[in-house]
Image (tube, rainbow, N blue to C red):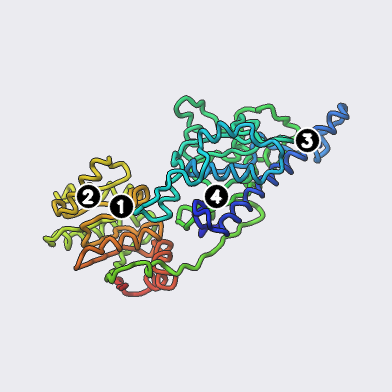
Amino acid sequence: MHCNKKPFYLKSNGPDSSTMDAYLMHALNHVHRTRDVVIRNDAKLRNDTDRDITDDKTYLDQGFTRPKVLFLLPLKSFARRIVKRLIQLSPLPQKDSAMGQFKKEFGESDDEGIPEHSTKPADFDLLFAGDIDDHFVFGVKLTKKSIKLYSNFYSSDIIVASPLALKRKIDGGGHDKKDFDFLSSIENWDHLEAVFEQLNQLPSKEHGTNVMRIRPWYLDQHAQYYRQTILLSSYLTPEINALFNGLCLNYEGKIKMVTEYAGVLPKIQLEVRQVYERFDASSIAEADGARFDYFCNKVYPKIQDLDEGGLLLFVSSYFEYIRISNFLKSKEASFCRIGEATSQQDISRARLWFFEGKKKILLYSERSHFYHRYKIRGTKHLLVYSLPGRKEFYPELVNMLGESENRKCNVLFSRLDLLKLERIVGKSSARRLISSEKGMFVFC
């Protein structure tokens, strides 16, 4: 598990390119070596049709199905770069059999759509320059002489997919028939979310496999212990930790790369007094409720008593966004909101109302900021209900206070927010925040 990987849409980053080449070469090597064994044994059996393979373990060379590698990627632009580089690294001479269709669906350039004069951060422009469609799934077949894209799943060596598309296929959504047997022999995969439960399960059909040549650990339902799992992320989350600790079970063990964070506070361009308030949460299950109770009982009464507006209320999850929105409605608060599902018309209206002071509170979600990276004018007081998962968002939010003379910033956190705290305030400060007997801390 490597959770400080530089985003690979930042193409100038050398170490990231090396990382991508490493796992692509690893995947190619894995597929070719596996196929070489199968082809060699096929040739032996053709030359000796009377050979009894039941007692010869050298012929146990297959899984339930052919696919051996799964790349799970969030956006088409990511898939385009992965497949393009995979083809470049392949030693096979014939590589263009399906590139026409691939370029039509996934585009031809990494830099399509980058604006010349943009007010957005550079990483935003690069990430959203390509195709941001998150619904795609196709197979890649490697033969003796060629790479073929869009091959049938059961004749493919590699599956490239988004979690959304693969989950829909597993569920049989739309016009797809429910089908996930092609995941039964996956041994090497890049990222995992919704499809994990179906990996390495016993298939419902044979799919033309010679049962006598299936490796015993597949038949004994031990394939999950032989699957190699590679988790790559720009930052660590409790969900990834839980996945790594509880569901990555390879018998050879695990490697986890640990990161020392310096924090992003130096990127704040203003002199802002940032007050961090710690609330108690005894477990992950109780953390959301404890945060909400602290906000309702300790924080909101102070907000309610203030006549001035300009409060930007930032939440990191959709669940929190809905919960706080319902609470503000129940209190008949003067507020507007910008979330991931808010229409462009409503977004423009909310930003105008907030800037003009017609609404005192603007509820703003992290996913909305991820997709738009708005600069919210009229912000006088920033209240971070829950810290953003992406560390670069924090200084962007605080810097929105630049037009205010009386700047205020309050951040709510618990001991369970350690991973986010480390990325924002630095590892040493984060440890101090969660271990101190005090419950309030100030950064300037």
| Front one among 343 and 427 | 343
Picture disc at residue 247: 4
- Mark 4 or 3: in front is 3
CB-based contact (under 8 Å), mark 4 and mark 1: no
Give the spatial CA distance, label 1 vs label 2.
10 Å
Q: Secondary structure at mark 3?
A: helix
Across and down, in percent, residue 221 comes to 64, 40
Residue type indicated by callout 1: Tyr
- Indicate the amino acid at tag 4: Leu
Q: Position of residue 360 (x, y in %)?
A: 16, 55
Position of the N terminus, as image quadrant, is bottom right
Labelled pair 1, 2 in contact (Cβ < 8 Å) = yes
- Could you say which is closer to the camera, residue 274 or residue 187? 274
Circle 2 or circle 3, nearest the eye: 2
* Rendering coords of residue 245 (x, y %): 54, 55
Tell me the distance, in whole angstroms, between the alpha carbons under discs 4 and 3: 33 Å
Which of labels 4 and 1 is toward the front?
Answer: 1
Sooner in the amino-acid sequence: mark 4 or mark 1:
4
Residue highlighted by disc 1: 374
* Mark pair 4, 1: CA separation: 37 Å
Q: Quick check: 75 left or right of 444?
A: right
